[in-house]
Each structure stands twice: as C-alpha cells, then as structure tokens.
Image (cartoon, grey):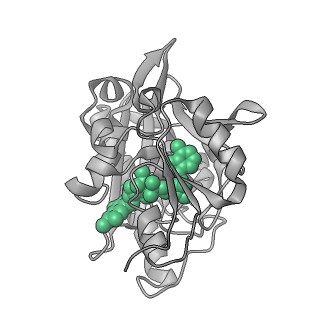
Amino acid sequence: MIPAEFDYAAPATLDEALSLLQEHGDEAKILTGGHSLLPLMKLRLARPGMVVDLRKIDSLSTIAVDNGTLRIGAAATHDTIQQSDVVSGHCSMLCECAGEIGDLQVRNAGTIGGSVVHADPAADWPAALLAADASMVLVGPAGERTVAASDFFVGLMESAIAEGEILTAITVPTQAAQGGAYLKMEQQASGFALCGVAALVEVDGGKVTSARVGITGVATAPYRAAAVEAAIGDGLEAAAAHAVGGFTPLDDIHASSAYRSHLAAVFTRRALETAAARAGGSA
Ligand SMILES: Cc1cc2nc3c(=O)[nH]c(=O)nc-3n(C[C@H](O)[C@H](O)[C@H](O)COP(=O)(O)OP(=O)(O)OC[C@H]3O[C@@H](n4cnc5c(N)ncnc54)[C@H](O)[C@@H]3O)c2cc1C
C-alpha cells in the first residue's frame, strides 16, 4: 500500500516547524519515527497534505538532567533512551520500559514523543511516565505549557495536545523511589502490551512504604493505579488485587476483560515485588 500524495518539509528549527503547522492547519501532520504515522498513511486512515519531519531539529533529541529534573527530548528514540546513562542514573525503570518496546528496528526509529502523542492504549511509555510523575512540555502559537502525565492521556488514542502544538520534551522529577520495575505481558504478534505495569517504590525497614504505579493495555487509556497505591500498607499482593480499581478492562480480539483483569493483578504484584527486591526490601 502507498500513501496518498503529500508535501514534505524537514525544518531545522522549532520556530520554522511551528510556522509550518500554523500555515497548513489541520492539513499538517508531524513525523518523527514514522512507525505509527506511516502505517496510518499507507492505510489512508491519515491523509495529511503536509508532513513536517522534526528529526533535523537537534534540540528535540537531547537528554539532560537540570536542577535534578530529567529532560528527555521528544524526538529521542526508544533505543537512545534505553542506552542512556543519564536516564539510567535518574530512573532506570525508564530504560527498562524502553527496552520492552517492539524490536530493535522499532526502537531505533520510534520516539518517545511520537509514542505518547499517538496515545495507543497498549503503548508502553504511558505506564512508565505515569509512575514517574512525568510532565509533557508542549510548545504552540501561544507559547509553552506543561501538562502532567496524569492529565495528558485523556482517552482512546487521545492526548491533551492541541492542534498546532509540538511536544518538545518530557520531564521527570527527582525520584525519591529506591526501586523500580516495568513488566509486561505482550501480544505475541505485535509486541504491544496486553498489560504493562510500571512501579516505583520506597522501602523502609525492608517493607514497601509507598508506591507509584502506572498501568497500560488494560483500559481505554493508561492510568495511575491510585487504588493500589492507597492499599500498599496491606502488603504487595493485597494491594495488587486493586489493579483495575475504578476502571473497566478492555474486551477485544486480543484478550477478554476477565483475562486483562487477571493480568493486571498478577503483573502489578510482580512489578511491585521486583521493584521492592531491587530496593533491598520485601513484600
Ligand atoms: C512493528 C511495530 C511494533 C511496535 N511495538 C510496540 C510496542 O511493543 N510497544 C509500544 O509502545 N509501541 C510499539 N510500537 C509503536 C512504536 O513505539 C512507535 O515508534 C510509536 O508509537 C510512535 O513513535 P514514532 O516516533 O514512530 O511517531 P510517528 O509515527 O512519527 O508519529 C506518531 C504520531 O505522533 C505525532 N507526533 C510525533 N512526534 C510528535 C511531537 N514531537 N509533537 C507532536 N506530535 C508528534 C505524529 O503527528 C503522529 O500523529 C510498534 C510499532 C511497530 C511498527
């Protein structure tokens, strides 16, 4: 399949990219890795008249820690993040998550920004970014704004980004957590998550005293598992039993609602146990 005809631009600066988006309005589509956009264009589910490729804007790919905050450029590839000592030193769970995405070819081309804006309910990054309390830095005609991950993933394939905006970076605050883990059960053909769970825990006296948990693949949008976090004092297995608390698990050709519900509890327990073990604690 080949896409419909389109114009292509690869601006060298963010200002040029923003101008192109303004000029072409809803005819324009941003491209970074192309691993989600190009299949949609080939299927003609997306028919942009203008494709704006961000990969020549070097600042969008940088990764740095500034004043304790990790800043990952939106066009950083999954593989770059997986291999990054800076990311690993700040929150190694993010590297683990990156390594779970697709295969090497996908990780070499696909970007963190493309993944979060595409907002596939089975994508891996959203769970990790929710658990890490990350924020999205968006730049548009009205300037820059920051949206917390918990407000960014608003529905099925729907994020809080507005038309004309570019996601420039993802920021992750200093992690008080001592241990982290990202685990998933993947759909065997696609590699996407039937259930993916990110956990960051704090441990005191060998016991988990607090946890932050993000879950993807289970509901129409990824979510922060507040019910698990609230019950952490009851022990990891008991807390994990609340993994779908307040959400309706998806029921589709890949897995039934009951199976996803089961996976959510099992993978939440395993992610919490792994994170606790890495922090030197236990259940
Ligand atoms: C075979 C295969 C297996 C995969 N397996 C997995 C998996 O296991 N787990 C997983 O999570 N994902 C998986 N993916 C998806 C992969 O991670 C994609 O890379 C990702 O979803 C999209 O990133 P991209 O950089 O390719 O974005 P693109 O395809 O270039 O863009 C995706 C969307 O985001 C928009 N966009 C991109 N960048 C920006 C930006 N900076 N600002 C504003 N809008 C932007 C585009 O306009 C488009 O709407 C897989 C993909 C393939 C093809």
Look at the image and tell me in which quarter the N terminus lies.
bottom left
**Residue closest to the eye, 142 or 170:** 142
Say if residue 215 shows up in the picture: no
Q: Residue furthest left?
A: 104
Q: Which residue is drawn at 43% across and 45% down?
A: 112
Q: In this view, does 61 lie to the left or right of 9?
A: left
Taking the image in four quarters, ligand 1 sits in the one at bottom left
Q: In this view, does 105 lie to the left or right of 168?
A: left
Would you identify the image quadrant in which residue 190 lies? bottom left
Q: Which residue is drawn at 46% across and 79% down?
A: 43
Residue 141: % across, % down: 75, 36
Q: Which residue lies furthest to the bottom in this view?
A: 253
**Residue closest to the eye, 236 or 258:** 258
Q: Which residue is drawn at 49% across and 82% down?
A: 258
Say if residue 51 shows up in the picture: yes
Would you identify the image quadrant in which residue 3 lies? bottom left
Looking at the image, residue 200 lies above or below residue 123: above
Q: Which residue is drawn at 33% across and 74% down?
A: 187
Look at the image and tell me in which quarter the C terminus lies.
top left
Residue 160: % across, % down: 69, 51
Looking at the image, residue 42 lies above or below residue 6: below
Residue 60: % across, % down: 47, 32
Q: Residue furthest top?
A: 67
Tally of numbered tags:
0
Residue 81: % across, % down: 33, 37
Q: Is residue 49 left or right of residue 177?
A: right
